[in-house]
Image (cartoon, rainbow, N blue to C red):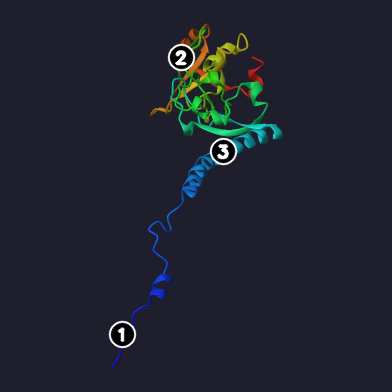
Amino acid sequence: MSKIAFPSQDAARSVPPTDPDAGAPTAHERLASRVRIPYAVTSVALVVTGAVLFTVAAWQISGRAPVLAVAQPIAAGQVVTQDDVKIVKVGAASDLGLVPSINEAEVVGHVAAVPLAAGTLLTAHMVGTADFPPPGQAVIGVALKAGAFPPRLGVGDRVNVWPGPDVAAVASASSAPVALASNAVVTSVGSADSVGTTVVTLLVDAQAAPKVTQAPSLSVVEVSPNEVGQL
């Protein structure tokens, strides 16, 4: 006959009582976890600040800073988008008043105050309320025949406006032809019509505007960057 074994009182006393709080974090551990959270946030902030300071220091050491330039032609009064600008590295950016790349928000979303050609290094005065045309200047439209202007003429290009070939031929018989307008700025270039005529708008000196608009025909010659300062 089998016997049923019951635990003795000594065995029962050897089993430790169950603690309902076993495994739960202590008050000290909870306090430590609270302290670690602000330290983690502070650490992230220090890392970001350090990265910015390192970048600025690298610019100063290299002597070249990233600034904003025009990526594609922008007409006066046009809102500048992110696709309209690009980052380039130049020296002495602070001396020229150029817009640092980190200040992109000062340009993007604002209106171009003047026509801007691709590659132009941006300064703060180039954007804002469009004050166009400036005092003493006028915007005029001219109809140019094929061959009377450079095929790659674009917004922001500087040009000299001359009488057309037929007018120049008559003038050359008595005297050398004279430019009707010097250092004019292209503000827009239209598409050629069915007969090959293209309408181009120019920013010219107000006194030269009547001579240009009254000429029976015109030709436009692009001004090289070296010539701009000589005009």
Q: Quadrant of the C terminus?
A: top right
Residue at 51%, 42% in the rendered image: 35
Q: Which mark is residue 102?
A: none
Q: CA distance from mark 1 to mark 2?
A: 116 Å
Q: Is residue 19 visible?
A: yes
When asked about the image quadrant of residue 157, the answer is: top right
Q: CA distance from mark 1 to mark 3?
A: 72 Å
Question: Which of the two residues, 162 or 188, is positioned nearer the viewer here?
Answer: 188
Q: Position of residue 9 (x, y in %)?
A: 38, 74
The residue under label 3 is which amino acid type?
Answer: Val
104 relative to 8, above or below: above
Viewer-side label of 3, 2: 3
Residue placed furthest toward the bottom = 1
Q: Residues within 10 Å of mark 1 (few under 14, many from 20)?
A: few
Q: Which mark is residue 48?
A: 3
Q: Position of residue 74 (x, y in %)?
A: 48, 26
Question: 43 left or right of 90?
Answer: left
